[in-house]
Image (spheres, rainbow, N blue to C red):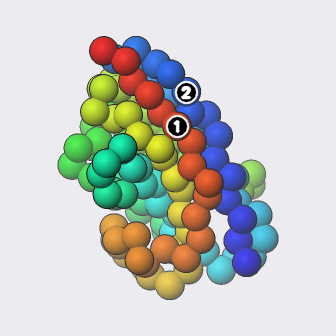
């Protein structure tokens, strides 16, 4: 079992920044990679970013590339999502997820085994 808890969401003006955190506990040794996803009202959940916990590898959705940075602190069992140059269309509930089964790049929600409860990010224009 893996438990994930997100924090750091909030309200920010367009052009601003936020940093989300995802703290993992439980069977952390079994995690291959962590991902961030987001879901806006009336839309499907979409992939944002992914980071491998075993090799230096990251991957981003085109919509956030160059603005968002995913990183990890293995000592703290925490993954971060630094979000800069935020836009109103970034408004969504952001969730982190743990992938125990796949290596490399995997962007589909069905490939992730554990999910956090989500944190709201609202970007005002």
* Marking on residue 120: 1
x and y percent of residue 37 in the render? 42, 54
Q: Is residue 94 left or right of residue 85?
A: right
Q: Is residue 6 left or right of residue 70?
A: right
State yes or no: discs 1 and 2 in contact (Cβ < 8 Å).
yes
x and y percent of residue 79 in the render? 59, 51
In this view, the residue farthest toward the bottom is 101
Q: Quarter-wise, where is residue 100 in the image? A: bottom right
Answer yes or no: is residue 113 visible.
yes
Residue 15 vertical placement versus 102 (above, below): above
Write the residue at 43% across / 33% down. Answer: 83
What residue is shown with label 2?
Answer: 10
Answer yes or no: is residue 49 visible.
no
Give whichever of 8, 102 is nearer the camera: 8
In this view, the residue farthest toward the left is 62
Residue 103 vertical placement versus 79 (above, below): below
Q: Quadrant of the C terminus?
A: top left
Residue 93 vertical placement versus 16 (above, below): below
x and y percent of residue 87 in the render? 30, 26
Q: Quarter-wise, where is residue 40 in the image? A: top left
Write the residue at 31% across / 48% down. Answer: 42
Q: Residues within 10 Å of mark 2 (few under 14, many from 20)?
A: some
Q: Residues within 10 Å of mark 1 (few under 14, many from 20)?
A: some
Q: Secondary structure at mark 1?
A: strand
Q: Secondary structure at mark 2?
A: strand
Q: How many marks?
A: 2
Q: CA distance from mark 1 to mark 2?
A: 6 Å
Residue 44 vertical placement versus 83 (above, below): below
Write the residue at 42% across / 59% down. Answer: 50
Q: Quadrant of the N terminus?
A: bottom right
């Amino acid at each position: 079992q893996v438990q994930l808890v997100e924090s750091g969401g909030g309200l920010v003006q367009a052009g601003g920044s936020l940093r989300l955190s995802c703290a993992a506990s439980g069977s952390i040794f079994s995690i291959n990679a962590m991902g961030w996803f987001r879901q806006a009202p009336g839309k499907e959940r979409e992939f944002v970013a992914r980071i491998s916990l075993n090799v230096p590898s990251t991957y981003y959705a085109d919509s956030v590339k160059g603005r968002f940075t995913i990183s990890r602190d293995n000592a703290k069992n925490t993954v971060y999502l630094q979000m800069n140059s935020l836009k109103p269309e970034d408004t969504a509930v952001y969730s982190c997820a743990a992938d125990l089964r796949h290596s490399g790049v995997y962007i589909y929600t069905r490939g992730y085994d554990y999910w956090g409860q989500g944190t709201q990010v609202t970007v005002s224009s």
